[in-house]
Amino acid sequence: MNIPPIIQVGDVLLSSDILTKFFCCDLDACHGACCVEGDAGAPVTLDEIAEIENCLDAVWPHMSASAQAVVDRQGVAYTDRDGDMVTSIVEGRDCVFTYHENGTCFCALEKVCREGKTFFQKPISCALYPIREKTFSDGTVGLNYHEWAVCRAAVRRGEQLHLRVYQFLKAPLIRRFGAQWYSELEGVAAALLLQSPTD
C-alpha cells in the first residue's frame, strides 16, 4: 500500500514527506545557513511581532550594528513581496536577529530566552523548519516539508539517526498544535509506515 501524498491529522493537512523523510539539523556542517540564506525573513504573526518588540532591550546587544540600523529604520518585521509579514533582514539576506560564534550562525532571540532574560523563544516558523505552514482561505492549516540544498547534511544525519522530520520537530510541533495533536500524529505515522515501509 502506498502512502498518500497528503495526510490529515485533526484539522491539519500535512505532506506525507513529514512522516517519511529523515532530518536532523547538523550545525557543524551547515553553520546555520537557513538564518542567512534566501531573500526574505522568517514568517511572523502580529502576536509574534509584539513579543519580539518586547524582547528588543535584551536582544539588542547581540545584534550587529547593521541589524540595529535596519530595525531602527523599519522595525523588527516588514511585508515581503508575497504580502506576508517576515522578520527584517540585513542587505537582503541575514535575519536581523542572527549572531555568529566560531563561524556558525545562531538566533539571538533564542539565546536570550535560554539565558532566562525573556520568555519568547523565536518565531514558530523558525522552530518548525524544515516544515513550512500555510493557512488557506477557509482557515485550514497545511504543513509542507521544504527541501533545500543547504540542508543536505541534515538529511544525511537524519538518515544516520533514523530520525524522521516529525520526530526531530516534536517540541515545536507540540508548541504549535498541542501534545494531544502530536500524539495523534505519532499514531497516524506508525500506522502508515507499518503499512508501507520506506526504508
Image (cartoon, rainbow, N blue to C red):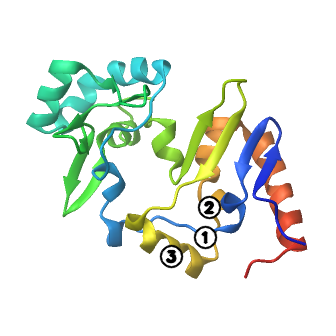
Q: Position of residue 126 (x, y in %)?
A: 45, 44
Q: Earlier in the sequence, mark 2 or mark 3?
A: 3
Residue 166 placement, left or right of 78: right
| Residue shown at 43% from the left, 37% from the top | 122
How dense is the environment of label 2, judged by Cα within 10 Å: few (below 14), some, or many (20 and up)?
many
Q: Position of residue 150 (x, y in %)?
A: 37, 65
Q: Amino acid at mark 2?
A: Val
Above or below — where is 7 with respect to 27? above
Q: Earlier in the sequence, mark 2 or mark 1?
A: 1
Question: What SS does tag 2 mark?
Answer: helix
Residue 49 placement, left or right of 11: left
CA gap, disc 1 to disc 3? 8 Å
Q: Amino acid at mark 3?
A: Arg
Question: What SS does tag 3 mark?
Answer: helix
Q: Of all residues shown, which one is farthest toward the left? A: 65
Q: Amino acid at mark 1?
A: Phe
Q: Earlier in the sequence, mark 1 or mark 3?
A: 1
Circles 2 and 1, Cβ within 8 Å, touching? The answer is yes
* Quadrant, the C terminus: bottom right
CA gap, disc 2 to disc 3? 11 Å
Residue 88 placement, left or right of 188: left
Q: Position of residue 68 (x, y in %)?
A: 15, 29
Foreground of the two, 101 or 80? 80
Picture quadrant where residue 63 is located: top left
CA gap, disc 2 to disc 1? 6 Å
How dense is the environment of label 3, judged by Cα within 10 Å: few (below 14), some, or many (20 and up)?
some
Q: Position of residue 95 (x, y in %)?
A: 28, 41
Which residue, given by chain and number where applicable, does mark 2 sit on? Answer: 165
| Residue shown at 51% from the left, 72% from the top | 155
How dense is the environment of label 1, judged by Cα within 10 Å: few (below 14), some, or many (20 and up)?
many
Q: Which mark is residue 22?
A: 1
Which residue, given by chain and number where applicable, does mark 3 sit on? Answer: 157
